[in-house]
Amino acid sequence: MIKHKKVNKIGLNKVWKSGVGNRESGVENNFSASASSALFSALSPYRPLLTGIIGSLLTILSGCAFQSPEVVINNTKTVEDITQTATSTTAAIPRTVKTTPVDRQVLQQLERRLYQQLQVLMAKAQGARPDGYVYTVDLSQILYYAAGKKDSRLYLPLRDFATRNLIIDKKSDPYTKGFVLWRYRDGAPADASGTTEALRLAESLWLGSQTLGDETDRQLAMSILQGYTRHAQIDHDKWLIRNYFNLQTRAFANNSFLVGYDPDLLKIVAQVTGDRELKSVAQKSYATIREAATPSGLLYDIIQPEVLTLVPELKQLAIFSPNDVVKLANTCTVAERAVEEAPEVGQRVIRFALARMPNLNTYYYGRNGEPVIPQKAEIPTYACLVRLSAKLKEEKAMYAFLNPFVNHVEFMAQNINQFSLYTVGEALLALQSVSQFNPPGSRDRLQSSSVSMRGRV
């Protein structure tokens, strides 16, 4: 909790009382982990060499690391073959899955209830998790929601807190200008930047500058995105956005998480501002996301060119998920932010999920789409699938995911203390996307994030 210095409090208690209206989806910043991934640790030279070689060969032959055995042996399929096979999702919806619209009044009432409970959560702990840290991804989700609602009384104190405590801007350290801390606790030293966090905060400030008319927020968003691009690197001929910058050791991570890419945001900002660097990074990000496609239609999570020092001929092994395990919510999060130029990625994700309804799970194997453990999908997964369907204007798919989502959120509204601020934010953003959804053929513009952020020049 943030208690030691008044200046660093988010300052929401007064607002909430007036009645104003672990990144849990696997987006946790990996600074708390070793700079080397679990895979590279498993292949450490300190282990017997023979064991490492056998393990690598088994991985390759089983298709766990990127391609199915068919692709490895025949070499007849390409990433383009995999990603360009998406078609309409309608045929993929099982007959037992409900696709009828949910009553808008029910959704509005549910959103109001969650919004009121959000106020209580924020006032109780000033936005901090049980470990006392405010996590940037949590705050950014609420900030984006507030910007979409044009709720200045919610938006402004969060924006001010982020400006004071989360965005680095030191004259003595110009290189880190615009870097965003992945978490903050009053009195604790800043440990690392976060790339996912930078994108989410920039997105929120960019939208806020349009809905609430503050040019300073737009400048802040640009500063953050420019800092984000300095995380880029080419390693073993592989372009990537390094996952974080360690502010203590002054070193970048040597890996990248796919949830740290948002080409739609970069493309839209580049179109508005004419920034060539952002445009270039956006195009490279789209290519990276397409390259991460699994044979089953999901996306691998990690990029680590360092593994190529062990198997230099197998370039595809630089993109993988540990033991081939993919979290559906992570894949959806990435696909949701690449609909502008890679809609086929999102369509494949929707088809994958629909084909497994109504018994949707959390974890699947990338090579064959089989569930890893019998853990059912929860709010973050359904919330993302609702938003993704809305962005792609897949109306029937949206309602197929919305019906179980509403059941989960109803339970959360009755047991709010069992859920985190992150999960509440995921739910509110999904409800907001549905309220702004216009069916295909409507004359009104779909006010999804990718469209509404275009705004004014």
Image: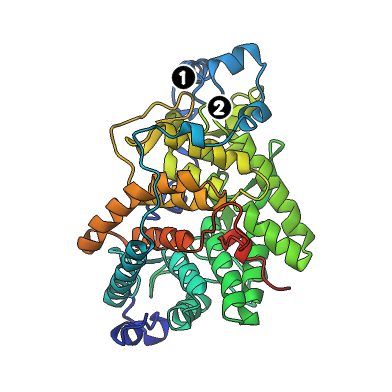
Q: Say if 425 sits above or below 164 in the image.
A: above
Q: Residue at 61% across / 39% down in the picture?
A: 344
Crowd rating for badge 2 (residues with CA inside 10 Å; few <14, some 14–19, many 20+): many
Residue situated furthest top in the rendering: 73
Q: Quadrant of the N terminus?
A: bottom left
Q: Quadrant of the C terminus?
A: bottom right
Q: Secondary structure at mark 2?
A: loop
Q: Residue at 43% across / 36% down in the picture?
A: 354
Q: Position of residue 451 (x, y in %)?
A: 63, 61
Q: Say if 177 sits above or below 245 in the image.
A: below
Q: Say if 338 sits above or below 130 in the image.
A: above
Q: Which label sits on residue 55?
A: 1
In the visual, does 360 lie left or right of 71?
Answer: left
Q: Position of residue 397 (x, y in %)?
A: 46, 43
Q: Which residue is mark 2?
A: 66
Amino acid at pointer 1: Gly
In the visual, does 106 lie left or right of 244?
Answer: left
| Total count of labels | 2
Q: Separation of disc 2 and disc 1 at Cα?
A: 15 Å
Q: Residue at 59% across / 26% down in the picture?
A: 310
Q: Position of residue 208 (x, y in %)?
A: 56, 74
Residue 269 lies in quadrant: bottom right
